[in-house]
Image (cartoon, grey):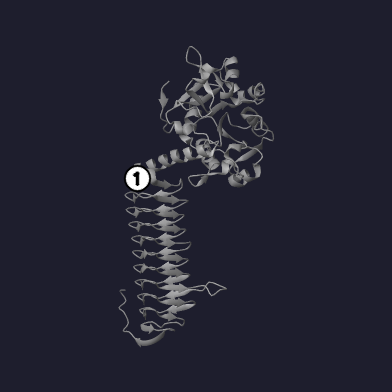
Amino acid sequence: MPSHEFEEPPSLTQPVRGIVLAAGKGTRMRSNLPKVLHLLRGLPIIEHSLRSVLQATGNKPLIVVGQDAAAVRAAVGERADFAVQSEQLGTGHAVMQAEAALRGDPAQQFIITAADMPLVRAETLRHIAAERERSGAAIVMLTVVVNDPRGFGRVVRDAGGNVSAIVEEVACSPAQLKVNELNGAIYCVEAAWLWGALRRIQPNPRKGEYFLTDLVEIAVADGRTVRAIVGADVDECIGINTRVDLADADAALRRRINRAHMLNGVSIVDPATTYIDLDVTIGADTTILPNTHLLGRTRIGSVSVIGPDALLRDSVVGDGCEVCQSVLEEAQVDDGGGVGPFSHLREGAYVGQHAHVGNFGEMKKSRLGARSKMGHFSYLGDATVGEGVNIGAGAITCNYDGVRKNPTIIGDGAFIGSDTLLVAPVEVGANATTGAGAVVTKNVPPDSVAVGLPARVIRRKPPKSSDV
């Protein structure tokens, strides 16, 4: 039974739709959150399955939901149609609930997969559909050969090597339990044959459930072909029933994501300690150092260095940047910018080209202009800082007066002395200087020096040239 590495298959000639089974209760997760809404590399489990089916078929799938229907519908939105399985009577019964919505559908074949199998690639689904088209089989299914059954059904073949049955683990004989070819629970089924075959499934005498896998024996009895494709990537068949399974799936998906970035020209020094969400983009020749987390929709340009010990969530980092041992949340760093170590850029923080935020700096809803520097232990909140500004160690904007947040504006070329307190709302003009320890409560004019508590202007400075 040779296994197959799936590449992009030929275009499908027969229309195909997906049926995604998501009605399971997920009791083994021991959670109030529906199983398929637990996060896997930054996205709900069902989102991974949904994207694969959409990409493989090009058509809106039908999702069979159960008691958590409202929550799943809210997560998926208008990208799928829905059917409800009110009673949990097995996988065959779940697909039966799709008949009312799909009978008469123009699709000539249906891909059936489970929402809790999020690592199945779109390429794999398309290959299964392409093989069903080519062979005219009633069913084409994915199998894997592994020693850990994970509760999957066993594939039974006849003397000629053809698939004759799938036996669920609860119904296996001792000999069948030793079979290491497992049902991957991913099928492409001929639409014209499916609905009548479903009605011939009998409830299992041990569990009283209707097993979808009984379709194989029904097809054989009808003289129809059932084909099995052995997949080379066993990770695709990781089903999530417990939090242990979720961790296994996360590790597998993390390896897949990291490998894809490395093949695209990103250097990941230690993939085992690098955590990258599915929707993150990284430019070529960027280096990711150990213990780095790139989360959400973070975008990183080329020739940057991120880490070690960095966490970026929904942030944008340009080309040629460095982010070391720092946290960025909904922040932006333009080309050539630097952050860290030990800095925190919060929502709305913006670091301009070749600007730098150094040790233990914090920004929130603030802009640090191009070539400006905020070196040590400083805080900018609700501030707009111009270009070529120096923010001295320990300088902070006092933006909150107990009722509202107030803005601070610092002009181009200003020099803010160490431990300056800028009591907002306040403005420091271009090329102005504040002395160390100054408490600025009133606007400082351009080209002036202000010192003291409260700060007062003591002299004027010659204007800087325009090439600051």
Does residue 307 sit above or below 59 in this rendering? Answer: below
In which quadrant of the rendered image does the N terminus lie? top left
The residue at the point 56 percent across, 24 percent down is 169
In which quadrant of the rendered image does the C terminus lie? bottom left
Q: Position of residue 79 (x, y in %)?
A: 58, 43
Viewed as shown, does residue 460 lie left or right of 276?
A: left
Q: Position of residue 158 (x, y in %)?
A: 51, 13
Does residue 398 sit above or below 132 in this rendering? Answer: below
Which residue is farthest right? 86
Which residue is farthest bottom? 458
Count the marks: how many? 1
Whether residue 163 can be seen here: no
Does residue 408 sit above or below 258 in this rendering? Answer: below
The three-letter code of the residue at mark 1 reads Asp
What residue is shown with label 1?
270
Q: Position of residue 313 (x, y in %)?
A: 46, 54
Whether residue 84 can be seen here: yes
The residue at the point 47 percent across, 22 percent down is 180
- Report which quarter residue 327 is drawn in: bottom left
Q: Secondary structure at mark 1?
A: loop
Q: Position of residue 3 (x, y in %)?
A: 42, 25
Instruction: Depth check: give the residue in front, 38 or 463.
Output: 38
- Report which quarter residue 343 is drawn in: bottom left
The residue at the point 65 percent across, 22 percent down is 206
Instruction: Depth check: give the residue in front, 198 or 242.
Output: 242
